[in-house]
Image (spheres, rainbow, N blue to C red):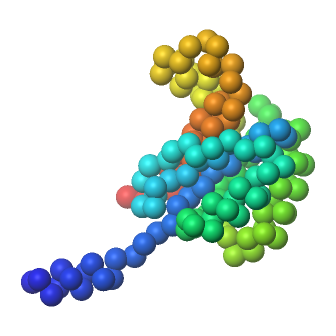
Amino acid sequence: MKDLSSFANQLQVYMGRLLAIDYGIKRVGIAVTDPDQIIANSLTVTDSSRTLDFLREYMSHETVDAIIIGEPKTMNNRPSEVEPAIAGFIQRLRKAFPTLEIHRFDERFTSKMAFQTMIDSGIGRKARQNKSLVDAISATIILQSYMESIKKY
């Protein structure tokens, strides 16, 4: 039995992380999963102009299986005004990481959910005005929602 257990451990497949992006004109919230893709956690908020550099550095030491990018839509299901900037970012991302899977995920209401999460967590009024914190939480909500949508039972 010991040999069988050892063999099974050698066959263990290591997954990479999923990474989610809440893209904004000024700031980008980034969240990642653990390597087993079970838990979504906020990673950071970057300046939009530095996001690709951050991702290059991050992916130089972490395996990322896919990137999920929030897809903001208006209430009538049309692309929001930031969509052209996101499309340009995705083109640059595909050029920088041509083999990486990129998925879009509806991010409607994530900012409101992030704000409510801060209230529910007891974060004070002054701290809730920190837009970077909202972006970081929004990216985490996008990632968690994406993971829930692809769960296979």
Q: Tell me where residue 69 appears, x and y as whole percent.
A: 70, 52
Viewer-side residue, 44 vs 40: 44
Position of residue 10 in the picture relative to residue 85 (left or right): left
Q: Is residue 88 above or below residue 74?
A: below
Q: Quarter of the image holding residue 66?
A: bottom right
Position of residue 151 in the picture relative to residue 48 (left or right): left
Q: Tell me where residue 58 appears, x and y as whole percent.
A: 63, 60
Q: Tell me where residue 47 appears, x and y as whole percent.
A: 78, 43
Viewer-side residue, 105 vs 8: 8
Viewer-side residue, 132 vs 61: 61
Check the picture and name the quadrant holding the C terminus: bottom left
| Residue 8 in sight here | yes
Residue farthest top in this picture:
125
Q: Tell me where residue 76 appears, x and y as whole percent.
A: 80, 34
Q: Give the residue displayed 69% in from the left and 76% down from the top.
A: 99
Q: Give the residue displayed 67% in from the left and 70% down from the top.
A: 100
| Residue 151 in sight here | no
Q: Is residue 73 above or below residue 10?
A: above
Q: Quarter of the image holding residue 74?
A: top right
Q: Is residue 93 above or below residue 44?
A: below
Q: Quarter of the image holding residue 72?
A: top right
Q: Give the residue displayed 50% in from the left and 53% down from the top.
A: 33
Position of residue 38 in the picture relative to residue 61 (left or right): left
Residue farthest left in this picture:
1
Number of numbered discs present? 0
Position of residue 85 in the picture relative to residue 105 (left or right): right
Q: Give the residue displayed 65% in from the left and 30% down from the top.
A: 134
Check the picture and name the quadrant holding the N terminus: bottom left
Q: Is residue 74 above or below residue 92?
A: above
